[in-house]
Each structure stands twice: as structure tokens, then as C-alpha cells.
Amino acid sequence: MKLKLKAGQRRAEIMEQSKGLFARLGLHGVSVNEIAEACKVSPAVLYQHFRSKEALYEEVINDLACEREDYVDAVLSGPSDFANVLYRMTVIFVKGRIRDADSVRIELRSLIDSNEIQEKFFSNHWKGLAEYIELSLQEMKEAGTIESIDSRLAVLSYIALVRQVMITLSLDEQEKNGGPGVEYYVKGVLNIFLRGIELPALDW
């Protein structure tokens, strides 16, 4: 006889099953009935836990967005200049993200869907890297180390480069198949970024 799940367990199972559907099909590409079928529950049971499909999607996104990385070790474990710290932070970030390919797929799908939930995902998930880049560039501008540049545009450019790394590693699974790893790709995109903001590339 199949054991009846407690409410918390059922809710967690619904979120886990629907995460894969949202990753493949997006918010608007899957119906409540399809989610219920994948979760092996009725739509009525689904609505007992989530008031709507959008509410379920938001819970999944918020759950992913709360998985923030700890960058203390990245800051303290090597050279303290901007480029080296950003390199170590990015490696930690990418490794954390590609552990769950569905989170990368959901982010890409949410960009296509373009809604308020996506904005929350973006601001929460990338906040650590974005704030470090913006604050560091501001300090360098004030010190006269770099010319005046649009810090926000620089952040968006770097995020676009890092997203490409995540896609390559989590969707094409290069690292798992013996191809170049996270460090190799991060070094490449970091040097592209550094040249773009007219800072010297790192020579590893």
C-alpha cells in the first residue's frame, strides 16, 4: 500500500517535479493538468498546496534563488586584486549553479517569458557577483584606475559571458565528458571582460 505523504513532503515533491517541467517548457508551456499528472496527484490536490500555477512557479524560482553562494573563502583565499577575487567568486558561483542543470534551464526560460518573477530570480541569484563588480568598479573610477564606465552595463556584460559558461557546462555537459572544466572557461570569459573594461588580462 502506498504511504500517504505529509503535507510538507507532498509540497516538496510537487515543487521538485514541476521544476523539471518549468525548465523544459517554461511557465506558459505547461498546464496545471500536466503538472498534476507528472506529480501523480489531481489538480484539486495541487490547488490545496498552491493557489495557482503562477504561485507554484514563483515558489520554485524563490527556492532556487535562495541558494546563494558563500564568497568569504573566495575573497580571502588568494590575491586580493579585483580580477583574482572575481575569478574565484565566479568559479564558486558557476560550480554551484551547474550542479542543478534545471536551475540554469529555468533561468533561460524565464528570460524568454520575461516577467516579474524572472526579475526576482535575476536579482537574487546574481546579486553577490553584481554587487562586487559594481562596487569595485566604482572604487577604481574614484581612484582614477579606470576611465568612467557604466558599471551596470559592465555587470550585465559579465553576466552574459558567465551565462554562456553555465550553458556550455550544464547543458552540453562538457566537463562530465572530459572536456575543459569550469576554471578554463571562467578564465577565458574573465579576460574578455577585463579587456572590455580596459584592465589588463590575467596571465595564468
Image (cartoon, helix red, strand yellow):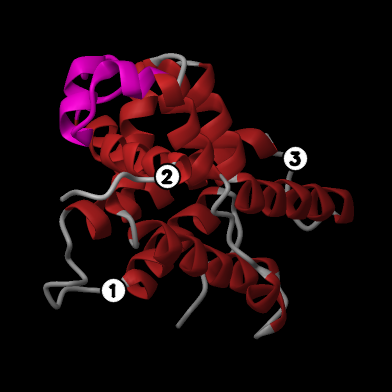
Q: Would you name the residue on which mark 2 appears?
A: 6
Q: Callout 3: helix, strand or loop?
A: loop
- Residue 181's disc number: 1
Q: Earlier in the sequence, mark 2 or mark 3?
A: 2
Which amino acid type is marked by label 3? Answer: Ser
Q: Is 95 situated left or right of 172 in this image?
A: right
Circle 1: is it few (<14), some (14-19), or many (20+) Cα within 10 Å? Answer: some
Q: Is 48 situated left or right of 131 in this image?
A: left
Q: Is residue 114 visible?
A: no
Residue 127 point in image, percent of width and height? 64, 45
Q: Residue at x 47, y 68 (%)?
A: 91
Direction front: furthest residue: 1
Q: Earlier in the sequence, mark 2 or mark 1?
A: 2
Quarter holding the C terminus is bottom left
Cα–Cα gap, marks 2 and 1: 41 Å
Q: Callout 1: helix, strand or loop?
A: loop
Q: Quadrant of residue 184?
A: bottom left
Q: Is residue 141 above or below residue 55?
A: below
Q: Is residue 2 above or below residue 40?
A: below
Residue 24 point in image, percent of width and height? 20, 33
* The stretch drawn in magenta includes residue 43: yes
Direction right: furthest residue: 142
Circle 3: is it few (<14), some (14-19), or many (20+) Cα within 10 Å? Answer: few
Cα–Cα gap, marks 1 and 3: 34 Å
Q: Residue at x 17, y 22 (%)?
A: 34
